[in-house]
Image: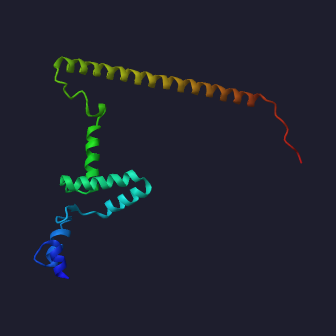
Amino acid sequence: MSTVYGAAAGGSGSSQEWVSNDWRNGRSHRCGFARWTPIELLAMILGFIVFWPVGLAVLAFKIWQNKSGYRGDLGTAAQEKWREARSAFSGPWGGRGPWRSSGNLAFDEWRAAEIARLEEERRKLEQAHKEFAEFVENIRRAKDREEFERFMNERRNRPEQPGPTA
């Protein structure tokens, strides 16, 4: 049986040599296919069952992985892409903030001045909103106080009613 494995591996006939060279390294160099991880297999099978384009995407990733020589698995590739996307959209303006130069000094100065002006306007609007919210709250309290005092006055001024006697 060892000669069959050895012949399949193209080695000297030792099955141990074939196993250690191909399967333990995570790649089958003889046939050109990367080894499937259990997560990748599960993702592909569930992808075809639930929504076939997901399974097709996993299969396409494995084919791309073989052709490009990419060593990572599907999880690693997803984490790398997630990190790239987060860094691209981090901060205000989606990574294209006022700190990034356009190459034109006059435009960059104008943009910085406009952003500062807009930030000041935003602060003024937030302050006006806060003051208006306080004003409305004071009106509500005054109205509630007035209604409560009217209730208490009516209660005090009503004639005593005799309670039920047994």
| Residue that sits furthest to the right in the current view | 166
Quadrant housing residue 89: top left
Question: How many badges with numbers are in the image?
Answer: 0
Residue at x-position 17% and y-position 81%: 2
Q: Is residue 112 above or below residue 20?
A: above
Picture quadrant where residue 41 is located: bottom left
Spot occupied by residue 162 in the image (x, y as percentages of width and height): 85, 38
Q: Residue at x 79, y 29 (%)?
A: 158
Q: Nearer the viewer, residue 45 or 135?
A: 45
Taking depth in this image into account, of 34 and 160 the one nearest to the observer is 34
- Work out whether 26 lies above or below 111: below
Q: Position of residue 131 (x, y in %)?
A: 46, 23
Q: Nearer the viewer, residue 72 or 33?
A: 33
Q: Which quadrant of the figure has residue 145? A: top right
Q: Residue at x 13, y 78 (%)?
A: 13
> What is the quadrant of the N terminus in the image?
bottom left
**Residue 7 at what x, y percent from top left?**
15, 75
**Is residue 24 left or right of 128 when viewed as pictured?**
left
Report x, y in % for residue 114. Answer: 28, 19
* In the image, residue 119 above or below residue 14: above
